[in-house]
Image (tube, rainbow, N blue to C red):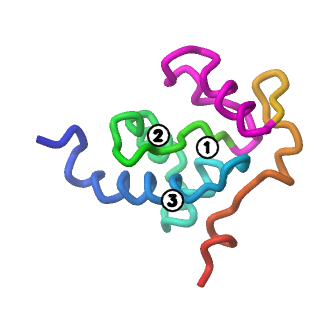
Amino acid sequence: MSLLPDKNADFFANVWQVARLIPYGRVTSYGAIAAYLGAKSGARMVGWAMNLSHLQNPPVPAHRVVNRNGQLSGKMHFATPTQMEENLTAEGVQIHNNTVQNFEALFWDPATELAL
């Protein structure tokens, strides 16, 4: 039995697959993943997928997905309130006031990076 509604399962699986491609020490946004998947207004749906990503195998590096301003808006969905920041910091990403520092330089855009 799937935890996801059938209509969302394929989209969620695609979100997780894209998130698995985010390089170590880089970040992307919910909106960038949504746009890459052809759902430009689907940032919130990407967030829902990230909320369920801890159940996935292989693992999904959900800590690398932040909001369009580089803020750790999904941090409350991790095991502890600081886990998202701790995971990013361990990868060399600097965080200040729940925001990725040097966000533009660390931003990984799947539309550019995964272009054929």
Stretch of the chain drawn in magenta: 68-93
Q: Looking at the image, which residue sits at the far left?
A: 1
Q: Nearer the viewer, residue 104 or 34?
A: 104
The kind of secondary structure element at disc 3 is helix
Identify the residue under disc 2. Answer: 50
Q: Residue at x 61, y 43 (%)?
A: 65
**27 sits to left or right of 1:** right
Residue underneath mark 1: 65
How much space separates mark 3 and mark 1, taking CA atoms? Answer: 10 Å
Question: Quick one: SS at disc 1?
Answer: strand
Does 45 appear above or below 52? Answer: below
- Look at the image and tell me in which quarter the C terminus lies: bottom right
Q: Amino acid at mark 2?
A: Met
Residue 12 magenta-highlighted: no
Q: Quadrant of the N terminus?
A: top left
User: Horizontal and vertical percent for residue 99?
Assistant: 79, 31
Kind of residue indicated by mark 3: Val
Alpha carbon separation for disc pair 2 and 1: 8 Å
> Mark 3 and mark 2: span between their CA atoms?
11 Å
Q: Is residue 74 magenta?
A: yes
